[in-house]
Amino acid sequence: MNNKIKKTFSDRCFNLINTLIMLAIAFIMIYPVYYVIIASISNAEKLVSFKGILFRPLAPTLLAYEQAFKNPMLLRSYANTIFVVVVGTMVSMIFTILGAYVLSRNNARLVKPAMIMVTITMFFSGGMIPFYFAVRDLGLDGSLWALIFPSAINTFNLIIMKTAFMAVPSSLEESANIDGAGHFTILLRIILPVSKSVLAVIALYYAVARWNAWFGAMLFLEERESYPLQLILREILIQNDMSNVSEGVASAELGFISVTIKYAIIVIATVPILCVYPFVQKYFTKGVLIGSVKG
Amino acid sequence: MLVKTKMTKESKGLLEWRKDFKRNWSLYLMFLPVLLFYILFCYKPMYGALIAFKNYTPKLGFMGSPWAGFENFRMFFDSPDFIRVFFNTIKISCASLLFSFPLPIILALLINEIRNKRFKKFVQTASYLPHFISLVVICGMIKTFVASDGFVGYFVNQLGGTSGSLLQQEDKFLPIYIISGIWQTIGWDSIIYLAALSGVDVEQYEAAEIDGAGRFRKMFSITLPSISNTIIILFILAVGKIMNVGYEKIILLYNPTIYNVSDVISSYTYRMGFETQNWGYSSAVGLFNSVINLVLLLMTNRISNKYAGMGLW
């Protein structure tokens, strides 16, 4: 009430300037993504010669997408990535749930040392090279499992989940204990059903991390057949290898169209994430909040 | 007498362990896969880091290779690369910290001042967007944008009278790295501050208003102090990570023409290991980095405990 009466001139100025700044920030955040989309459906030659800020596609065409989909590796690697995301996230969730449950039972004697063992790894690691050797010595290199097991647990996620499990009221568990329920029953029947939101958040974190991962794939995979999407994207976008997407294009034209093909590939690789983004966004922000309770 | 009581104490301890194990064996069984993960992928590499003290050749293997003491470390400190990667790491980290740390706080403060709920939601959603784009794609976008015919590269070259991709020019690497980093993280990093801000007591604002405080005054006297704990904790974490520049982004963006300004300890470790197969040497470089990280984290935590009265532990 007081607020409305007291809206002074300086208050209004503040609101106006703040709104302008916020609009500018929103523009800066969205424009690069928007640019990629409209550039991908633009005529390549016109795009290259256009100088300035682009707001709508130039002579729209889907040629770049046609060329991009000619690359057999693109779809193949998409399938590999989906495998890693789905199976990898399941593996991660099983490991993390088990670990979080055990670490949340602090009346068992070995739990405290286990917690120390886990925490140390957040502050110290052997480094890239010994890690590579450890994975290779297990014979995992060359297979997609090398992208799944060595990164099965993210200790930070484990601790977030442990904190959430500890917050489950012990009265719920005690009632089950009287009926002689074992640890597996408590976990499956009591802890998991009441922790759905933290499970969703952590599963999302794992899924996105796996979708984005490329470094492990670069270290451990030899065969191009098993490359995940991000590694193929790296070849095309970073290393400029257009050999697979330029089939059937005259070499004179290639210089132009390679740019729009790149944009088309970015769109193809990013659209699935951007489609689910509005729906999962609130879970992500929730995750940050759950994590921050600890800090 | 004395011996006897000691004995009973010991057997009592044993008995309690046995009782604990009897009650919790299924719990410990559940932990087995987790234990296996930590041993195989965290602790074994820590042990494997001893390769840094060896003169490693693949033919002789880890056990068979002769010990070399601190030879690998000495070689690193003596090489001209040391100064370069060490100072590049510090330079890139400090610049990141200088810009990427305070900007999310400012953004959160400004978003917090938006009165219209829907507009607030829109700005937040827009600012998180880059967080959902993969690093490879972001670097691909950077590369195409700053190429000589890209929309950023063209303008910057016109203004500066330069030519070619901006990523081929030494003085442009740091700005590209920092600005794109801000774009990637500012929205996401602001969430945690916004959450802390939502907990601020409304009565304080009302009281300040009665005293005639304006918007800025309220922001600096009420809003900012109320999130100072969050800021301190995140600052400790950020300083602790200062020698830990994200090598993935560096490796994706750099190229030999700008190694001088872009090569950091972790990217150097990667190249020495996987490109020149200098395993012992590169492990030594990596271990040096890990140890510095640990020391930095412990130090900042200690300083913060002493002067701010709070820390990570």
Image (cartoon, coloured by chain):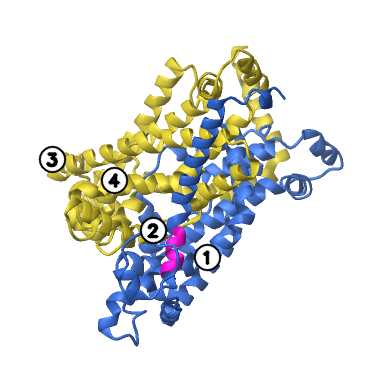
Chain colours: A blue, B yellow
User: Looking at the rendered structure, which numbered label has been put on residue B175?
Assistant: 4
For the residues carrying marks 3 and 1, which lies nearer the camera in this image?
1
Q: Tell me the chain of label 1.
A: A
Q: Pointers 4 and 1 in contact (CB under 8 A)?
A: no
Give the quadrant of residue B72: top left
- Looking at the rendered structure, the kind of residue marked 1 is Val
**Same chain shared by disc 2 and disc 3:** no
Front-most of B37 and B6? B37
User: Looking at the rendered structure, which numbered label has been put on residue B78?
Assistant: 3
Q: Position of residue B258 (x, y in %)?
A: 19, 53
Q: Tell me the chain of label 4.
A: B
In the depicted structure, whether residue B209 falls above or below residue B93: above
- Looking at the rendered structure, the kind of residue marked 2 is Phe
- Looking at the rendered structure, the kind of residue marked 4 is Pro
* Disc 4, SS: helix
**Same chain shared by disc 1 and disc 2:** yes
Q: CA distance from mark 1 to mark 2?
A: 22 Å
In the depicted structure, whether residue B220 falls above or below residue A101: above
